[in-house]
């Protein structure tokens, strides 16, 4: 299923604000990050430090379940304030 | 009811402070973060703030709700866009019945903001550009 994945910070600067990935209904967070790292290996370190958000909530489990309208975002280390 | 705002408009401290004054409170603690010129030997020229706005608002609302459940009032404003040295980036104000809670809750709010709220800074130093604290 095609899922839009939002990117921010350095990740967005390298790959754009959003990428569309063909993902299974259920995917491990690490596998999702690996799919993005495959687009730009230099982002590996940042991706390892990043969290994933599903429908604007941080994911705390190892796997996520996706629907076509799921809002997926990769959240690099935040630096507000 | 908490007031939460994330946008490019400058931070008006007095206007935000006014939202925190009410008869049930006796103290108010405000944290203001602004753009610092020097970090050790690194000189900052400007900072660009960006956010995942809807999620950031949600996260800030959660922080505020936790404090307001205990009896405080919360006002948080984070500025986005390009800020130069000295520009205010964040305002966190917490009113409480007594000073002890005001200090404690305000510190909790800004510390949690720095950990859990999807806002990012791109820092332009005199010799390089870096994301966050990298």
Image (cartoon, coloured by chain):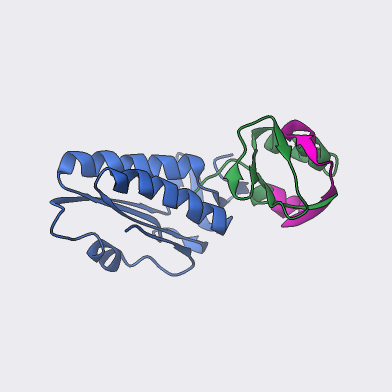
Where residue A25 appears, as percent x and y from the top left, is 81, 41
Q: Which of the 4 quarters of the picture holds residue A38?
A: top right
Where residue A3 appears, as percent x and y from the top left, is 79, 51
* Residue A34 versus residue B57 in the image, above or below: above
Question: Is A50 in the magenta?
Answer: no
Q: How many marks?
A: 0
Q: Residue at x 69, y 29 (%)?
A: A62
The residue closer to the viewer here, B28 or B85, is B28
* Residue B104 versus residue B87 in the image, above or below: above
Q: Which of the 4 quarters of the picture holds residue A48?
A: top right
Look at the image and give the residue range highlighted in magenta.
Answer: A11-31
Please indicate, yes or no, whether residue B125 appears anywhere in the rendered image.
no
The residue closer to the viewer here, B7 or B55, is B55
The residue closer to the viewer here, B37 or A46, is A46
Q: Which residue reaches farthest top?
A: A62
Q: Residue at x 55, y 53 (%)?
A: B55
Chain A display color:
green
Where residue B44 appears, as percent x and y from the top left, is 50, 51
* Residue A30 versus residue B9 in the image, above or below: above
Q: Residue at x 43, y 54 (%)?
A: B35
Please indicate whether residue B32 sits to the left or right of residue B23 in the image: right
Q: Which chain is blue?
A: B
Question: Is A13 in the magenta?
Answer: yes
Please indicate, yes or no, whether residue A15 appears anywhere in the rendered image.
yes
Q: Which of the 4 quarters of the picture holds residue B21?
A: bottom left
């Amino acid at each position: 299923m095609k899922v839009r994945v939002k990117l921010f910070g350095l990740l967005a600067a390298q790959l754009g604000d959003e990428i569309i990935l063909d993902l299974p209904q259920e995917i491990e967070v690490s596998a999702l990050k690996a799919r993005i790292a495959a687009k730009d290996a230099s982002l590996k370190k940042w991706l390892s430090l990043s969290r994933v958000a599903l429908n604007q909530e941080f994911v705390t489990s190892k796997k996520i379940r996706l629907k076509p309208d799921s809002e997926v975002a990769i959240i690099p280390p935040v630096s507000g304030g | 009811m908490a007031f939460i705002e994330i946008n490019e408009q400058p931070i008006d401290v007095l206007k935000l402070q006014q939202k925190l004054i009410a008869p049930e409170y006796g103290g108010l603690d405000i944290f203001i973060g602004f753009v610092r010129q020097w970090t050790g030997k690194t000189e900052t020229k400007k900072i660009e703030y960006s956010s995942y706005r809807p999620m950031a608002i949600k996260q800030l609302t959660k922080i505020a709700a936790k404090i307001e459940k205990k009896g405080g009032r919360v006002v948080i404003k984070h500025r986005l866009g390009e800020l130069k040295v000295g520009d205010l980036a964040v305002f966190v104000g917490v009113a409480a019945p007594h000073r002890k809670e005001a200090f404690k809750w305000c510190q909790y709010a800004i510390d949690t903001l720095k950990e859990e709220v999807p806002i990012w800074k791109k820092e332009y130093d005199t010799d390089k550009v870096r994301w966050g604290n990298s």
